[in-house]
Each structure stands twice: as structure tokens, then as C-alpha cells.
Amino acid sequence: MIELKNLVKTYGDTNAVDNLSLRIEKGEVFGLLGPNGAGKSTTILMLCGLIQPTSGECLIDGIEVSKNPIEVKRRLGYMPEDVGFYPNLSAGRNLDFFAKLNDIPDTERKERIEVLLRLVGLSGVEKKVGGYSKGMRQRLGIAKALVNDPDVVILDEPTANLDPQGVSDYRRIIRNIAGSGKTILVSSHILSEVSKVCSRVGIMQKGKLVRDGSWDEITRNLDLLGLPEIIINVETESGMPELIHEDIIRVDYFAERTKARISASKDIRADIGRTLYKSGTFPKEICLDAVTTEDAVLSYYNG
Ligand SMILES: Nc1ncnc2c1ncn2[C@@H]1O[C@H](COP(=O)(O)OP(=O)(O)OP(=O)(O)O)[C@@H](O)[C@H]1O
């Protein structure tokens, strides 16, 4: 569990983090979102005990970070934006080094490293880390953050510079870790990515948490954010009827009418759901398109 209580970090005249309070429960995957300079990295650095707060508290599993850094380090896995590895060593040898630094006993190290390499899809890769792609390094970074079997995992911009395959691998890995009951904090400014893996997101702006809730809650009032047009993707179990609604601008149907892409002037997901139920068509998904959602949230950032 992660708790931030009235956290403040000031650099001269800049309130990098401004009275931030937040609680992330065990097993939650929380996305910390915000534009450049919002205060995400400063928050994470305080949470990891790497910088001291000006005031307020950070707690990991109820233990205050600044007062018990060693105890906290044992429960915490951290992946910074740029993870440092020894380029002349393999992934396994790198992990072995970090496992030793974390005092993992000899009897456990080999098996744990094998499990982690399998989790991140690097099992059997003999190549030295110096020859790895960005995606491979990122996956190894996640394994490194998990080497001490932490309760709480913090990933700073984990999808930065990843190609689509890398992003999809990352999502699979995060879901896998979340399934094991760990608490995960992911910081990002790639909103659509966070929306796909996080159960809850918080939006930071100028050091403050300006919104906190599920992705759905945050995007529910999209029309209030002033988007001229939103896109709704619909998927049904069997072919859907003609979708008619006064706020629909256009509908494109695909895959024998089991999929539709609706352009609408409002968020009409509830009405679409009702229409489908009435016609006896079971909806598998009715969601806002990630790209337009991203536009809306960005417009929110910009006031
Ligand atoms: N060591 C420092 N000295 C002075 N100002 C700093 C320092 N670290 C951060 N800041 C300032 O604090 C604010 C928050 O920065 P921070 O790096 O936490 O934002 P961020 O949300 O992580 O941004 P990014 O996505 O670009 O990493 C910014 O205005 C930044 O310039």
C-alpha cells in the first residue's frame, strides 16, 4: 500500500509537489499522469527515499520512507526512466548482480532470476545487454525492479520510446505482476497506455492532483471538456441493428456488423447500450476511443 500525506517539495520559488495526498491500495495498478513538469518524478523520488520532502509524509505499507529507508527498500521495486545495466553482461548476470546487492540468498537467486526472465520474455537470451533494443532493456528494467520480490512496484515512464510490440509486451507483463497482488504505480504522459493497464489514474498538474478516479470516471463528462466530436467503438456478440440517435454524426460498421465506430457530438454510450439491449444484441464493448479520450484529457490539462 502507498500513502502520500500532504506531501510538499519546494525548489526555490517552484512548488514541484504541492500538498499532495493520495492512497493506493494493495493490488491496485495506479497511473500517475501529467504533462512535463507536473511533479510526477519528484513525487516518485520522494516515495523511493531518493530525495527528502520539504514537508509531509510518504508511507509504503504503513512505514514512513524518510524515517525507515532500509525497511522500505526491501518492500519497494523501482524502475527509473533510464535503467543502468552492465553492457558486457547477459540479462541473467545483470539480475544476479542486483539480486546479490539485495541480499537474496544463493539458494533462491537462480530460480528467482529464471522466473523473472521468463516473465519478461528474456529467458534463454544469451546476448549481452549492450546489444539489446530499447524494448528489451525496458523489460529487463521491470525484471530488475522485481528482483527483491517487492510488495510495491514503481515504474517511471515505462513505455517511453517503445515500439508497438514493446508496448504490448509491457501491458502483458504489468497485468501479470498485478495478478500476483502487488501494488503498482506507473507514471506516464502516454495517456492511452495508462488507461489500458491501470485500475485508477490520478492527473497531476503544477504539483497538485487535479483528478483521481477510474479512467471511466475521469472521462465520463468528456463533452464538458469541449471536444467538438467524440468517437465511440462498439463491439457486439452478433450483428447489431442500425444505430440511430440524434447526436450521431456518422457510423461505420465492420466485421459483419459486430463492430462499429460511431462519431457523435456527445457521449451517448448509455443510449447505445440501451438500444442494443432492446434489440437483443449483447454488447461486448462500448468504449470511448483512446485517441480522442487522450485529446480530451490533454485539453483538460491545458485548462
Ligand atoms: N532538482 C531540481 N531543482 C529545481 N527544480 C526542479 C528540480 N527537480 C524538478 N524541478 C522542477 O519541479 C517541477 C516538477 O518536475 P518533475 O520532474 O517532477 O515533473 P514531471 O512531471 O516528472 O515531468 P517529466 O514528465 O518532464 O519528467 C518542474 O517545474 C521542474 O522544473
Image (cartoon, helix red, strand yellow):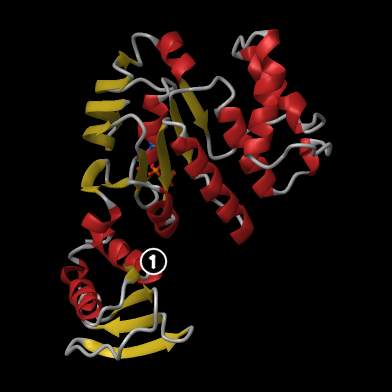
Q: Name the residue that disc number 1 marks.
A: 290
- Horizontal relation, residue 136 to residue 71: left or right: right
- Name which residue lies at 36% across and 33% down: 27
- Name which residue lies at 47% across and 16% down: 73
- Name which residue lies at 59% across and 50% down: 169
Which residue is nearer to you in this view: 300 or 24? Answer: 24
Look at the image and tell me whether residue 90 can be seen: yes
Which residue is nearer to you in this view: 32 or 264? Answer: 264
Residue 232 screen position, x and y as percent: 32, 75
Task: State which quadrant residue 258 falls in.
Answer: bottom left
- Name which residue lies at 63% across and 41% down: 139
Which residue is nearer to you in this view: 235 or 227? Answer: 235
Vertical relation: 285 (above or below) 138: below
Q: Tell me the element at label 1.
A: helix
View quadrant of ligand 1: top left
Residue 75 screen position, x and y as percent: 45, 18
Residue 203 screen position, x and y as percent: 28, 49
